[in-house]
Image (cartoon, rainbow, N blue to C red):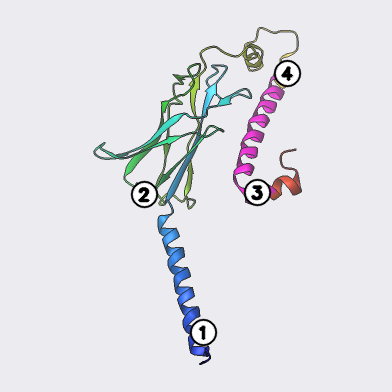
Amino acid sequence: MASLRITPATTAAVLFCAALFSVAADTAVATNAPDYVIQGRVYCDTCRAGFETNVTEYIKGAKVRLECKHYGTGDVERTIDGVTDETGTYKIELKDSHEEDICQVFLVQSPRKDCAEVQPGRDRAGVLLTRNVGICDSVRFANPLGYFKDVPLPVCSALLKQFDLNDDDQSGSPVETLIARLQVYTLWMWELASKAIQDLVERVPRLCWLREQHGLLH
């Protein structure tokens, strides 16, 4: 029985074919990858405050739509629908650029009957879907979109009083009153910033070492 001989030429041919297959596979993956991922959140303004607070709730199952219109003609060039996950986050994948289009994500439908009133000014958000604006990342973040809750939560009355800038309370000096209000605003802004940082860290595994080594959120 003849023995099988593996010559250097055979080995080189096998390695070449394997390398060629690997390059082809990587090219196929790169070709199928989206050019852009539009990401944003949909929230329920539980205090009807007109902005996000520390009792804001994020809506699961909210429907949104990406729409791109030509800048000159106004014709709709592209529409893609999206749905939010359990964190109220939607991600819409897009394959091509829209340099000459005005693209916006807007609200379509809320799954919550108690939070379905569209908040003026928060019903749509613009996104730039071109690389000619100095943004290299393929992920494009849209501003949050919001609905009003039909009846504010009981805690909202006390919460919104913290942001009342009326001068009805004359119990302290103007400086003391100003300092107290600044402290409230600082605490509120820190809570919102911490929530945003926590959300970012959970979504980007490479940033987890910031939390572990530097105590970023503590």
Q: Which residue is mark 2?
A: 97
Residue 88 drawn at (x, y percent):
53, 32
Q: Earlier in the sequence, mark 2 or mark 3?
A: 2
Q: Earlier in the sequence, mark 4 or mark 2?
A: 2
Marks 2 and 3, how far apart in space? 28 Å
**Comparing labels 3 and 1, the label whose residue is closer to the camera:** 1
Amino acid found under the numbered disc labelled 3: Leu
Q: Is residue 32 left or right of residue 60?
A: left
Dot label at residue 175: 4
Give the alpha-carbon distance from disc 3 to disc 4, as whole Å.
Answer: 41 Å
Quadrant of the rendering where the C terminus is positioned = top right
Q: How far is the residue under mark 1 from the one under mark 2?
A: 44 Å
Please provide the residue range marked out in magenta: 181-208
Q: Is residue 195 magenta?
A: yes
Mark seen at residue 66:
none
Q: Nearer the viewer, mark 3 or mark 4?
A: 3
